[in-house]
Image: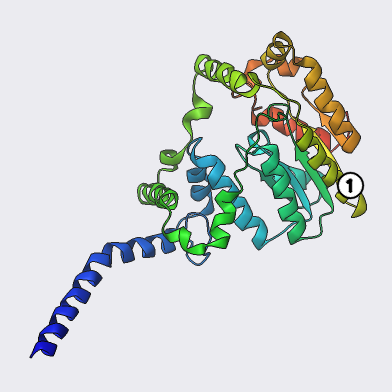
Amino acid sequence: MYTSNFNMTFLGYIKKIILFLIPVYIYWVAVFIIDPYEFINVSHWIDSKTKIAAINRSDEASPRGNILWKYIEFNRAPKSHVIFGDSQGRKISVELIREYSGKEYFNFCIPGASYETIIQNFWHAAGKTKLEKVYFQVGFMNYNACRSYSINHFAEDYFKRPFLYFTNREIAFDSYYNLIARITGDIDIVDNKYNKLPYPQLDSLSKNYLNMFFNDYRYPIKIKNELGKIADYCATNNIELSFIILPNYRHVHDYLTAKGLAERELLFKTDLSVLGKVYDFDTDVPENHVRENFIDYFHPRENLLDRCIEKIWKQELAY
């Protein structure tokens, strides 16, 4: 009698646990179907364009989202021609490069990427394939020992512990925004409104970013040395190495001059010139004085970016 009662009680608890976990099962199935990063790559109910828009919906989501997306995409189909960089280079069009050069490139530019992140991305790519030609899109903003950090864990954690894909709250938010965009058919729901802010607001934010980048500055010996190791690796392995310095709006240079950092910026460019070919578009030319050519002070709009692409891959003119 006692055993029978115990069994009934035990089975009752099991049923309650199963019922309690039903929402969890539903959530797991939803993540499997939505698959916001194509990590599982079985269901394609939501198209890649919507998923990429959801990744870039905010400044918080974009760094962690892009690095996970890029790692998955590169691991699945490594390319020997790669562009490494940060948010300045995120919209470098590999389709336009293919039109000019006839080569397939992978854009490994990650918003929010530090030099540590960019360097780690290079070594990750080098471990996956035989690289032939690499470009580092870099800027003076993070060439600073006081700006040392890495965001690579936002990708690496999921490869080390895949179960996180079904338990991490960020994946839950990403899945939610993908789902809403898919149900409504309105991709504007996940559109990043930053690019469409009025210029006075963008200018104010840009000035805040300048203070964040340069209030504290210390010459980055470690970064220079790590780039030197990459240059040595490229020379040893017959990899063509180049650097791209994309344009900033002229107010950035006014600020650097006022802060006494103009010579430091020149040293940054000199450091790069020792390591490889440098394409320097951040110069005192008329198009860099036109505010409409930039989103904020640091990010050229696509018309200016495309002109840079043309000069590199169509004309191959080194500055």
Viewer-nearest residue: 293 or 213:
213
Measured as percent of width and height from the top left, residue 308 is found at: 77, 31
Colour option used: rainbow
Which residue is pictured at 81% across the width and 50% down the height? 102
Looking at the image, is 213 positioned above or below residue 166? above
Q: Give residue 214's quadrant in the image.
A: top right
Residue density around tag 1, few if under 14, some if 14–19, many if 20 or more, within 10 Å: some
Give the SS element for disc 1: helix
Residue closer to the observer: 218 or 310: 218
Q: Nearer the viewer, residue 130 or 258?
A: 258
Quarter of image, res 227: top right
Task: Pick out the residue farthest to the front.
Answer: 2
Give residue 127's position: percent from left, percent from top: 75, 59
Q: Position of residue 237 (x, y in %)?
A: 89, 55
Q: Is residue 121 above or below residue 207?
A: below
Say which quadrant the C terminus sits in: top right
Q: Quadrant of the N terminus?
A: bottom left
Is residue 285 in sight in this rendering? no
Count the marks. Answer: 1
Q: Position of residue 69 (x, y in %)?
A: 58, 52
Judge from the rendering whether residue 177 lies leftward or rightward of residue 97; answer left or right. left
Q: Residue furthest bottom?
A: 1
Q: Does residue 23 show up? A: yes
Tell me the kind of residue under disc 1.
Answer: Asp
The residue under label 1 is 232
Give the side of residue 204 with respect to residue 78, left or right: left
Q: Is residue 243 left or right of residue 14?
A: right
User: Farthest residue toward the top?
Assistant: 258
Tell me the residue at 31%/63% (across/down).
24
The part of the image, by quadrant, that contains residue 28 is bottom left
